[in-house]
Image (cartoon, rainbow, N blue to C red):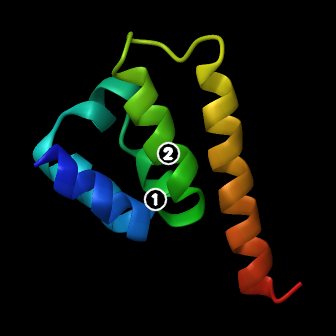
Amino acid sequence: MPFVVALTAIASPRIGLLLVAASTALLGRAFSDGVVPLVGFLVLPWTTLWFALLWSTGEQVAALEWAVVALALAADLVSWRKLAGL
C-alpha cells in the first residue's frame, strides 16, 4: 500500500493526501486540528503532504527535513504560478 500511495502522490498530491488520510493517522499526528490539513489540501498540497510524511519520521520536522518542506513549498508556488498563467 505505501508504494501505491507514493506513486499516486507523485502524480497528484491531493489524491495522495486523501489516500494518506484514509489509510494512516499521519495527518492527525502532524497537525493538531483538521483545519490546517484541509487548507493545505486546497492551497499547498505538496507542502502539506511532505510535512506530514517527515513529521512521522521523528515526531518533528528537523534540520535538513525543512529543506525538503521548502522544496515542496516551491513546487506549490510554481503550480500556482502556472495556474495564474504567469
Where in the figure is residue 84, as x and y percent of width and height? 79, 85
Asked whether, in this view, residue 73 is left or right of residue 35, the answer is: right
Between 24 and 57, the one lying in front of the other is 57
Label 1: few (<14), some (14–19) or many (≥20) C-alpha neighbours in 10 Å: many
Residue at the spot x=33%, y=55% of the render? 17
Query: How far is the residue under mark 1 from the one under mark 2?
Result: 7 Å
**Identity of the amino acid at label 2?**
Thr
35 to 62, vertically: above or below: below
Element class at badge 2: helix
Label 2: few (<14), some (14–19) or many (≥20) C-alpha neighbours in 10 Å: many
Which quarter of the rendering shows the C terminus?
A: bottom right
Is residue 12 among what the camera can see? no
Residue at the spot x=40%, y=70% of the render? 11
Q: Say if mark 1 contacts mark 2, CB within 8 Å.
A: yes
Residue at the spot x=75%, y=66% of the render? 78
**Identity of the amino acid at label 1?**
Phe
43 to 29, vertically: above or below: below
First-in-chain label (1 vs 2): 1
Q: Residue furthest right?
A: 86
Question: Label 2: which residue?
Answer: 48
Where in the figure is residue 45, as x and y percent of width and height? 51, 57
Where in the figure is residue 55, as x and y percent of width and height? 42, 22
Question: Label 1: which residue?
Answer: 41
Residue at the spot x=34%, y=22% of the render? 56
Q: Report how many numbered discs are placed on residues in the image.
A: 2
Query: Which label sits on residue 31?
Result: none
Where in the figure is residue 16, as x and y percent of width and height? 32, 59
Element class at badge 1: helix
Is residue 55 among what the camera can see? yes
Asked whether, in this view, residue 85 is left or right of residue 2, the answer is: right
Asked whether, in this view, residue 29 is left or right of residue 40, the answer is: left
Q: Residue furthest bottom?
A: 85
